[in-house]
Image (spheres, rainbow, N blue to C red):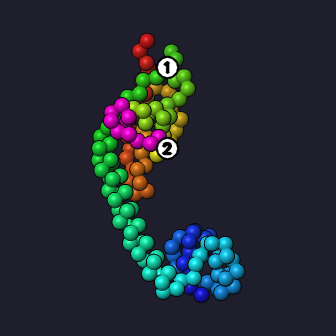
Amino acid sequence: MEIILKEDVVNLGYKNDIVTVKSGYGRNYLIPTGKAIIASPGAKKMLAEELKQRAHKLEKIKQDAEALAAKLEGISLTIATKVSSTGTIFGSVSNIQIAEELGKLGHEVDRKIIVVKDAVKEVGRYKAVVKLHKEVSVEIPFEVVGEEA
């Protein structure tokens, strides 16, 4: 029996895949739980049209991400924070401070897509990655300096 998956199913396939399964598995589990529908000719046509429309939307989203990545390329940030006499930061610098600094430069970036690999707890140079799309990311270098009193 051929079915169209409506969500990812482990060891079977991903959403919108057309797969062949045994009749009992399809009729007794996948279809009643809403994980799949029968792959009738009409359903296949609807799936093809939906994928075509989604591909256009996804391409637009990717182009927007690439445009923003081009703007962010080459930016270097300096973040001033309170520092002890040994060069240790009170607290740490996180993606929130990086998003705020990018906002001051006129680039509104959601803090949730900014990744700082290690905890920034000392003065120095670091790198953050802005993941704009699953295929588009930008590395932004930033320097943490002591705040002038």
What's under tag 1, amino acid-wise? Val
Q: Crowding near pointer 2: few (<14 within 10 Å), some, many (20+)?
A: few
- Which region shows up in magenta? 102-112
Residue 66 point in image, percent of width and height: 32, 52
Q: On the image, numbered disc 1 is attached to which residue? A: 83
Instruction: Single out the residue that lies furthest toward the top.
Output: 149
At x 42%, y 72%, the residue is: 51
Q: Position of residue 93 (x, y in %)?
A: 49, 31
> Disc 2 designates what residue?
112
What residue type is disc 2 on?
Answer: Lys
Q: Nearer the viewer, residue 103 or 41?
A: 41
Residue 86 position in % (x across, y down): 51, 18
* Residue 63, label in figure: none
- Is 10 displayed left or right of 142 in the figure? right
Task: Determine the secondary structure under disc 1.
Answer: loop
Dot 2 falls on a residue whose secondary structure is helix
Given residues 122 and 115, the one toward you in this image is 115
Above or below — where is 14 with respect to 149? Answer: below
Residue at screen point 51% across, 15% down: 85
